[in-house]
Amino acid sequence: HPIPRFPADFLWGVSTSAHQIEGAVAEREPSVWDVFTAEPGRVKDGSTAAVACDHVRRHGEDVALLAGLGVNAYRFSVSWPRVNAPGGLDFYDRLVDELLAAGVRPVPTLFHWDLPATLDWMERDTASRFAEYASVVVDRLGDRVTKWITLNEPAEHTLLGHALGTHAPGKQLLFDALPAAHHQLLGHGLAVQALRAAGAADIGIANSHGPTWPASQEPADLEAAAFYDLLLNRLFAEPLLLGAYPEGIGELMPGDVAADLKIIGEPLDWYGVNYYAPTRVGAPQGTEIEFGGITMPAELPFSVREIEGVPVTDFGWPVVPEGLTELLTTFKDRYGDRLPPVVITENGCSYEGLDDQARIAYLDGHLRALHRALEAGVDVRGYFVWSLLDNFEWAEGYARRFGLVHVDFATQARTPKASYAWLRDVLQAQG
Ligand code: FCB
């Protein structure tokens, strides 16, 4: 294959999130994830993120790893419970300075699932609290941070945290969880207003998306797949890009939805996409389904099916690079001029081992697929690998390793994997 070249001003980065790497729990308020992990049986290996990668103390070493990798951007998240604690913003203040000194552009996400334990996205008021918190952060960092992300994956946070209960806060509300989605989206819109009022001008979101492949051409499978696509993709993209919910959804949301949609639909400067894999979906099968670490109850109006004939990661997630091209070209076809420039804010895989040839193959395939989307006319401006470090992978604990850098959680020793050297060489060659 010819080596694809990317534009010279392309953003190349890696992503992390506060709860998954920071540790230093005693120096911040508790979050819903602290409460959740303290409940027996919630996290598969019984672990917590109390220490995680000890990043709050080892940030210097981690910034050096970023510099050595040669990325020009770093997506991290700001912990709202840390900002609430006295002196909490000092940490991010220092981190931003260190990143800039290393030539790495800081790209903070304001919310990556670690809600202060006293708050609840089922409450409308949380949206206003989020915008106030966004103001506090931008007032402190906005002189040096120029690119912002409001939310990470409100779809997963709604589905896993509020509908199925496999993530914090552990609510099992099924479709009654929809207000949590609406309130996150409203919080996003209010935060965009707050950031812009403070002078920020380059604001996006990180939404998880993937193509939905129907299990067959039977009407029941097509219908189930279309519904899944609506829940995962359209419900979170369309209020932002079109200022409207897909048909039948707005009626299920609380509050003055028409007025809220004006706030939610404020045009974005760019649109972040987290892509891992497509999902194959068919009609419900009347049984509980275990998939990629998630148990889905029998009463859902769809069932997730295996994608046959493709490799899977150690997490069991299918490896389908061309799904990224399909996703981006589909979004361009669906939303046309309403789709702002796109940045891939997460893409990566979980594999064991330091000589991680499978991760290299995954990233190589996805970069080629991304380049095909560029050639097809999708305005893609950047790509962030999930993740810099092995870290606390939510309900899976430390059992899933997504890092370009291995972390020995007993000693906190960091060891770059083969994929780290590979990506460094790709970045040096601009392709
Ligand atoms: C995404 C999350 C991220 C990480 C990856 C593997 O859904 O945003 O925190 O857990 O999956």
Image: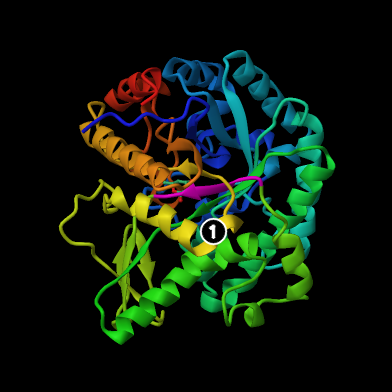
Colour scheme of the picture: rainbow
The residue shown at (30%, 47%) is 321
Instruction: Report x, y in % for residue 223.
Output: 38, 82
Please check the rendered image and state whether residue 358 is part of the magenta-colored stretch, yes or no: no
Q: Nearer the viewer, residue 350 or 407?
A: 350
Please check the rendered image and state whether residue 272 is part of the magenta-colored stretch, yes or no: yes
Residue extending furthest toward the left: 309
Instruction: Report x, y in % for residue 291.
Output: 31, 63
Q: How many marks?
A: 1
Dividing the picture into quarters, in which one does residue 400 lie? Answer: top left
Q: Is residue 196 above or below residue 127?
A: above
Residue extending furthest toward the right: 197
Residue 176 as seen in the image, left or right of residue 344: right
User: Looking at numbered disc 1 in the image, what kind of residue is underneath it?
Assistant: Gly
Q: Nearer the viewer, residue 260 or 396?
A: 260
Q: Is residue 168 above or below residue 65?
A: below
Circle 1 sits on which residue?
Answer: 336
Task: Judge whether residue 341 can be spotted in this image.
Answer: yes
Task: Judge whether residue 286 can be spotted in this image.
Answer: no
Instruction: Report x, y in % for residue 286.
Output: 31, 84
Instruction: Report x, y in % for residue 320.
Output: 27, 51
Q: Is residue 195 above or below residue 235?
A: above
Q: Is residue 393 above or below residue 251?
A: above
Quarter occupied by the C terminus: top left
The residue shown at (34%, 23%) is 426
- Label 1 crowd (10 A; few <14 / some 14-19 / many >=20): few
Residue 413 as seen in the image, left or right of residue 89: left
Q: Secondary structure at mark 1?
A: helix
Q: Which residues are magenta?
A: 269-275
Dividing the picture into quarters, in which one does residue 360 lie? Answer: top left
Residue 37 as seen in the image, left or right of residue 385: right
